Amino acid sequence: FRKSLPFTFVLMTVGALALAAFTGTAGFFSKDEILGYAAERGGMYWAFAIGGYIAAFFTAFYSFRIIFRVFYGEKCEEAQELERGQLAHGEPVNPHTGEREDNEVGFPGEDHHIAERAWPMRVGMAVLGLGALFAGYIQVPGVDAVLENFFEPVFEESPLYAIVPSTLHSWIGLGVGSVLSILGISLAYYLYIFAPGSTDRIRERFSGLHKLLFNKYWFDELQDALIYRPVLAVGHFANDVFERYVVQGIVVFVRNGVGGLGDTVKAAQSGFVRSYATLVIAGFVGLALYFLITAS
């Protein structure tokens, strides 16, 4: 899609460079600033800093893996159609659920336009691209400290306020980050441009590791077994058993009890004086019997 979506290609490459912490970009300064503070604390925080640099290497790798796979290599049918002026689009159906999606709201819309060709989208993307390229220069170690001075009143009460990496350590960290960024980008270039078939061989050789990573450490399955299914079972129990037999049982019992009591009282209130007189006499007889029995 490099030729069919040139503006997107340029801006996505800029974003990938910043995400990879390439020298001079915003990510180059911000990422190493965080890792530099972690290293300055020493002790176990060195492990966090080292882990962060390892993660930075893989971030550079997968950022340009996207670039090389989407914008380089053989052109797919959709890219060729776009270059010919045809607006390719898929059916407005969710491939996972089969549900028809509403294409009257949002992208691509009824006309299936290409978003990068609209000037509001270009302006928004350009602003983000400029920030990704140049925003880091407001906080260059040993040169300026605009952000640090701006946020200083917020963090001056923190017990970690005095921990500030030296300029030398900051630039050493920037140098290490730059090397890792270039190595990550170079590895992505080698695997997906220079030797595109090598990933298949690596996948076959490390099939177990590939399976582990492909299945995301089976985290979704673990979450499903430990959280989703137990909560679903509790929900079914609450609805099918507790709600039906306990909650509704109490409601029905109270309703029937009140209704039965009402029917009894209603039967006693016949409206005939002789019935009331009979009840009064029966009451007096009952009281008399009670006192006679208790007095004997």
Image (spheres, helix red, strand yellow):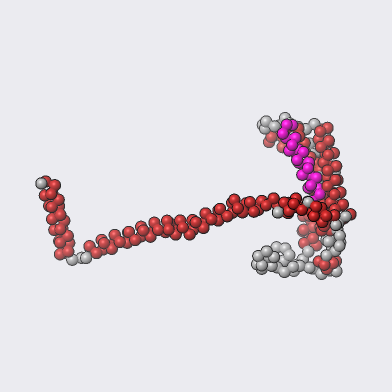
Q: Is residue 79 in sight in this rendering?
A: no
Asked whether, in this view, residue 5 is left or right of residue 243, the answer is right
Asked whether, in this view, residue 178 is left or right of residue 280, the answer is right
Where residue 62 sits in the image (x, y, percent)? Answer: 79, 51
Where residue 257 sits in the image (x, y, percent)? Answer: 32, 59
**Quadrant the N terminus occupies:** bottom right
Report the residue at 81% width, 49% height from top: 61
Asked whether, in this view, residue 254 is left or right of residue 83, the answer is left
Q: Which residues are magenta?
A: 42-62
Q: Quadrant of residue 270?
A: bottom left
Report the residue at 85% width, 39% height from top: 175
Report the residue at 15% width, 61% height from top: 277
Asked whether, in this view, residue 291 is left or right of residue 248, the answer is left
Q: Quadrant of residue 229?
A: bottom right
Report the residue at 13% width, 55% height from top: 285
- Residue nearer the viewer, 12 or 106: 12
Where residue 236 sits in the image (x, y, percent)? Answer: 51, 58
Magenta stretch, overall SS: helix
Q: Is residue 52 magenta?
A: yes
Measured along the vertical axis of the image, is residue 72 above or below residue 135?
Answer: below
- Residue nearer the viewer, 163 or 217: 217
Where residue 51 sits in the image (x, y, percent)? Answer: 75, 40
Q: Is residue 71 in sight in this rendering?
A: yes
- Residue nearer the viewer, 33 or 228: 228
